[in-house]
Each structure stands twice: as structure tokens, then as C-alpha cells.
Amino acid sequence: MEFYMAPLEGITGALFRKLYQKHFYPFERLYTPFFGNTGFNTKEMRELDATEAGGVPVIPQILSNKAEDFLLIAGKMKDSGYTAVNLNLGCPAGTVVSKGRGSGFLKHIDALDTFLGEICEKSPLPISVKTRIGFDDESVWPELLSVYNRHPITELIVHPRLRTDLYRPPVRTDAFAYAYQNAKMPLVYNGDINTVEDYERIRVAFPEIRAVMIGRGILRNPGLLGEIHGKAPVTDRQIRDWLTDLCAQNLAAYTETPTLYKLKEIWSYLQERYPNRKKELKQLFKAKKLYEYENAMAAILG
Ligand SMILES: Cc1cc2nc3c(=O)[nH]c(=O)nc-3n(C[C@H](O)[C@H](O)[C@H](O)COP(=O)(O)O)c2cc1C
């Protein structure tokens, strides 16, 4: 069983991936948040260089419903040195769905079939897919899976929720079990692995899957992957060293405001570890200046 880092837009950018791999038990593969534009802006250009982290491959993700655009972006990914691309068929954001992209594409199964045919035939790089199991009706999942099975998709990462579920628990494990029985390509499970027990449940139920992909679980507990591998839980000191490194490296590339924004995004999950630090956490989220953030962090982590 392998372990993949999930793409989290606004959080798991190049610096996050590099420093997570350096400070904690490393993943075997890392997926970028989606690239959705054919012309790359400065931020995207900066992200493009990060084809690996600590010797582990990074797979860039593309969000598109136009074969021509997908192929153009995939070509740029190849030129940048990547060896595979991933297609986003899960994003539930209203602005994405309304354009028929991400999970919005799951409403148009025939168009998706045609799109997959064209990109799989012409893509300069192998394509994997990350998908939800439907838009608002789970009964389409067998049909959707049979479409995926018709194309040479290298790997299917399934987050077993509908778009209308957003991120609400529980995940629809039965739909994943259906894929486990019927998918023709290697399968990856994604969704709500937050503890060692969550992982064990998936491993026992689906022993033949290629990998599990974990996102928010490593923000809630950065030591989760280590614990799954039998290591001791991480200490507050390790978390502090990681966040200090992340802060310094972000400041070398960005200004104070976006750096603070990114760190607070991480803390919006990490705060669950510190239920008795409500006052300090409030100060951390209120911080407008770096020193205010650092003081609040020191009060929580020592
Ligand atoms: C803030 C945030 C940003 C996300 N960005 C992406 C993204 O860019 N591409 C993608 O495929 N999924 C994205 N996702 C979905 C996650 O990759 C993952 O499928 C989902 O969070 C379930 O897995 P988890 O419970 O391990 O986090 C995002 C989720 C969150 C919460």
C-alpha cells in the first residue's frame, strides 16, 4: 500500500509539500492543487518548477472540460519535467461546477466520455483521474465507472462522495466497494482518513488498492502518516519547527499577508489538537502582523 498526499488548493503548494516531506514521515507521491488556466500566472509559474519533493514524484492536477485546453496544459507540464498528470473531477466549488468543470462535469456523462477519449488519445503524459461518485445521485456511479473503464486511465482516485455531499460525513463506502469490485484500473481510496483506525478500516476492507490519499488528516495531525507506520506521535516542538520553517520560506517568496493567510489555513485544521487553547487560537486567527501570529503560536506550541 502506498500513501499519496491529497491536493488542497490554497494549502498544499510547492513549499508545503517540500517542507512536509522534510519534517514528517514522507508520502510516496504528491498531487498539486488544480491548474485551471491555459495561461499561467506568476503564482502558477512558481508552482510549475516543483516536479518533485525530497526525491518523490509530484503529479500536477488539471481542471478542465475542454480537451484542447487540457492538452495544452498537459503539454506545458511535460515541458516542465512532469511525468504524469491528474484530471480533477471532484471540485465542488460553485464557480467551478457552474462552468461544468470538476464535479460539475459528472452531470454530463456523454460529454465526459468524449472528452476522456480525446485526451487519453492525444495527451503527451499518462492520465490519472480523481473523482467523486456523482453529482447529486449515487445511482449514476456504475455508469460513470463503466465510462472510466473504457479509457486507458492509469489510476482512479475515488473520493466516495457526491458533489451535493460537499465534505459532510459519512463517506459512501458502499460506492467505493462497488469500484473495488468493478474498476479495471488500479484504485486509490480518498476521504476522511484522520486516524490510524480510519486507515486500518480501509486497509482491511480493501486490501488490494494501490494507495490511500490523505489530505485534511495530516493537517489535523501532521504525525498521522508516521503513526500509521508505527512511529511515535509528533511533538509540539516538531510542529513548531515545521511551521517556523514554512513561515520563513513563504516570507522569502511572498509578502506577510499571504504568508499569514496560508498559515492560518493550516491552523484552521491544526487547532483541533489544542481544544484547551481557545484564547491563544483566537489571537492567532486575529493576527494581522507576523509578530502577533508568532506570539500566539509560541503560547500554543511553546
Ligand atoms: C481546502 C481544500 C482544498 C481542496 N483542493 C482540491 C484540489 O485542488 N483538487 C482536488 O482534487 N481536490 C481538492 N480538495 C479535495 C481533497 O483533495 C480531498 O479529496 C478531500 O479533502 C477528502 O480527503 P481528506 O478527507 O483526506 O481531506 C480540496 C479539499 C479542501 C478541504
Image: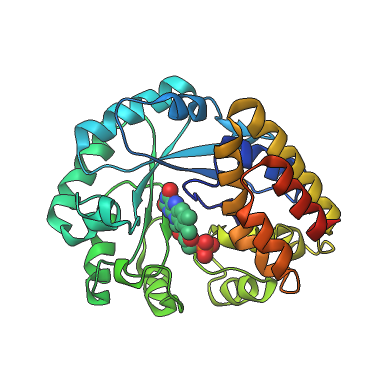
Looking at the picture, does residue 211 appear above or below residue 182?
A: above
| Residue furthest to the left | 110
**Quarter-of-image position of residue 198:** bottom right
| 58 to the left or right of 40 | right
Q: Quadrant of the C terminus?
A: bottom right
Residue at 55%, 57% in the rendered image: 215
Picture coordinates of residue 129 (x, y %)? 37, 50
Looking at the picture, does residue 185 appear above or below residue 128?
A: below
Picture coordinates of residue 275 (x, y %)? 71, 73
Examine the rendering and report whether any part of residue 120 can be seen: yes
Picture coordinates of residue 173 (x, y %)? 44, 77
| 197 to the left or right of 226 | left
| 78 to the left or right of 116 | right
Looking at the picture, does residue 64 appear above or below residue 44?
A: below
Picture coordinates of residue 246 (x, y %)? 69, 39
| 156 to the left or right of 112 | right
Q: How many marks?
A: 0
Residue at 80%, 64% in the rendered image: 230
**Quarter-of-image position of residue 221:** bottom right
Residue at 53%, 25% in the rendered image: 49
Examine the rendering and report whether any part of residue 1 can be seen: no
